[in-house]
Amino acid sequence: MGREPTRLYKGTYEDAGRLLISEAERSLGDSPQTQEALAHTREVFRDLTATTVLIVGKNTGRVYSLVYASNGPKMTRKDEIVVDQFDQPVDIQPPPDVAAPTGDQNASRCPEPAGDFPWIPAAIAAVLGPLLFLGASAFLWPRHL
């Protein structure tokens, strides 16, 4: 990908729905409606296995592909992000009402990470957390028409 060698990182979480189930058990009340929602949450998210696959360039550290898949008896989902045009120019302009930066341009930059591995769990967590929340919200808060 991108004409450079790549590394594949893969993480599998055997009980990916457990955190969501335990949070629902802790936060939901004892009313019949919430017990019904809790039972539905347990049914959908029990035995849920999540897998994250990340393809990273060895030379540049660019993320070329991120795939998140979750599989269980009542839910299957796959999200894939692929970046394949790193060589295309991008012209990003600030909005016209933003003042020009002052002072040292390098003072506000974030430091570069020491290696290519420490940011990978953060990237996986950044994708996994919102996806689990969105998947759970569809079942915990049913829509009434």
Image (tube, rainbow, N blue to C red):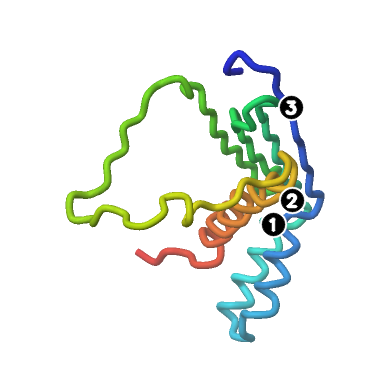
Of all residues shown, which one is farthest toward the right? 14
Residue 1: quarter of image: top right
Name the quadrant of the C terminus. bottom left
The percent position of residue 49, horizontal first and vertical second, equals 76, 47
Instruction: Please tell me whether mark 1 or mark 3 is closer to you in this view.
Output: 3
Label 1 crowd bin: few (<14), some (14–19), many (20+), radius 10 Å: many
Nearer to me, 93 or 105: 105
Nearer to me, 80 or 20: 80
Look at the picture and state if 56 lies above or below 137. above
Q: CA distance from mark 2 to mark 3?
A: 26 Å
Q: The disc labelled 3 sits on which kind of residue? A: Arg
Q: State the residue at coordinates (69%, 79%).
A: 26
- Mark 2 lies on a secondary structure that is loop
Look at the picture and state if 145 lies above or below 101. below
Q: Which residue is mark 1?
A: 45
The percent position of residue 3, horizontal first and vertical second, equals 60, 13
Q: Which residue is mark 3?
A: 7
Label 3 crowd bin: few (<14), some (14–19), many (20+), radius 10 Å: some
Please say if the residues under marks 1 and 2 sit with CB atoms less than 8 Å apart: yes
The percent position of residue 63, horizontal first and vertical second, equals 60, 33
Q: The disc labelled 1 sits on which kind of residue? A: Phe
Q: CA distance from mark 1 to mark 2?
A: 6 Å
Q: State the residue at coordinates (74%, 50%).
A: 48
Instruction: Please tell me whether mark 2 or mark 3 is closer to you in this view.
Output: 3
Look at the picture and state if 110 lies above or below 137. above
Q: State the residue at coordinates (63%, 47%).
A: 123
Q: CA distance from mark 1 to mark 3?
A: 31 Å
Q: Which residue is mark 2?
A: 48
Residue 32: quarter of image: bottom right
Q: Is residue 117 left or right of residue 105?
A: right
Q: The disc labelled 2 sits on which kind of residue? A: Leu
- Mark 3 lies on a secondary structure that is strand
